[in-house]
Amino acid sequence: MLIHCKLVILILVLSVDGQVLLREIFGGHEVVPHSRPYMVLLELHMLHGLTNYCGGFLLNEDSVMTAAHCKARFYTVLLGVHNVHNSGEVQRVSVDQTFPHKDFNSTLLKNDIMLLKLNSKAKFSKNVRPIALAGQDDGSLPKSCRASGWGKTDRNHKYMSHVLREVNVTLTDSEKCRKDNLYCSEGETGPAEGDSGGPLVCEDGKAYGVVSSVLKPKSGGPLIHGFT
């Protein structure tokens, strides 16, 4: 992995020692259409013709960031999406190469970040624009952040949201999160099933992390959402 940045958020549902890969926004709201032009919907083409979904975000004309646990046989990147049922001006681009973090641990979900190199360049427009990455971490926590995605909106829904949604999150200071190079938030609201790989965007409009997982503490207490 050639990019040194600290990113994480939440998306595919999979339980591993109390950790869950996430795919949904709980407690959020629909965004103004195309107000997040960096957002990417990833089609994950799996074995036996199955298709799963993750989020991602556009870094430049041919690079997308997502979570390393969003593994697939091959990918299709959808740019300029708001409503998944309206494909009129959506750009569909295949992925040429994948670069998961060299130290990604799929069991512990550490270093859960991956760069995708597109097969052709994205065409920038008012609906398709890259987002800047935050600079070197100075040890302070951003005060106001948000996570976006097309994941399920509550635990009773079987299907992903057809429109892009987001939720505000407040980052918490945690020794464990710092040790694991994560940003974390607590509580029931946050990214969830279907939102993995999307960006953690804070008050300066830059991407600070990638939606990765949620931890259910064995001792009880609120859920902990992790952003790589």
Image (cartoon, rainbow, N blue to C red):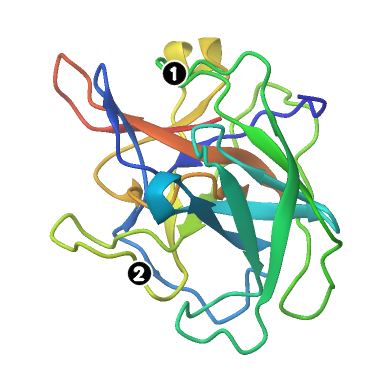
Q: CA distance from mark 1 to mark 2?
A: 31 Å
Tell us which disc is closer to us: 1 or 2.
2
**Residue 58 visible in the picture:** yes
Q: Nearer the viewer, residue 225 or 213?
A: 213
Left or right, 139 with reference to 148: right
Residue type at numbered disc 1: Ser
Left or right, 193 with reference to 55: left
Query: What residue is shown at x 82% (from left), y 66% (from top)?
Result: 122
Residue 209 lies, in percent from the top left, at 60, 38
Among the 4 quarters of the image, the one containing residue 33: bottom right
Residue 43 lies, in percent from the top left, at 52, 58
Is 228 above or below relative to 157? Answer: above
What residue is disc 1 on? 174
Left or right, 13 with reference to 198: left
Among the 4 quarters of the image, the one containing residue 117: top right
Is 73 above or below relative to 127? Answer: above
Characterize the local packing of mark 2: few (<14), some (14-19) or many (20 or more) Cα atoms within 10 angstroms.
many
Query: What residue is shown at x 54% (from left), y 77% (from top)?
Result: 82
**Residue 204 visible in the picture:** no
Of the 4 image quadrants, the one containing the N terminus is: top right
Say the numbered circle drawn on residue 161.
2
Residue 81 lies, in percent from the top left, at 58, 75
Q: Nearer the viewer, residue 46 or 69?
A: 46
The earlier-in-sequence mark between 1 and 2 is: 2
Is 86 above or below relative to 167? Answer: below
Query: What residue is shown at x 66% (from left), y 23% (from top)?
Result: 101
Of the 4 image quadrants, the one containing the C terminus is: top right
Q: SS at mark 1? A: loop
Characterize the local packing of mark 1: few (<14), some (14-19) or many (20 or more) Cα atoms within 10 angstroms.
few
Q: Nearer the viewer, residue 45 or 190?
A: 45
Query: What residue is shown at x 58% (from left), y 21% (from top)?
Result: 111
Residue type at numbered disc 2: Ser
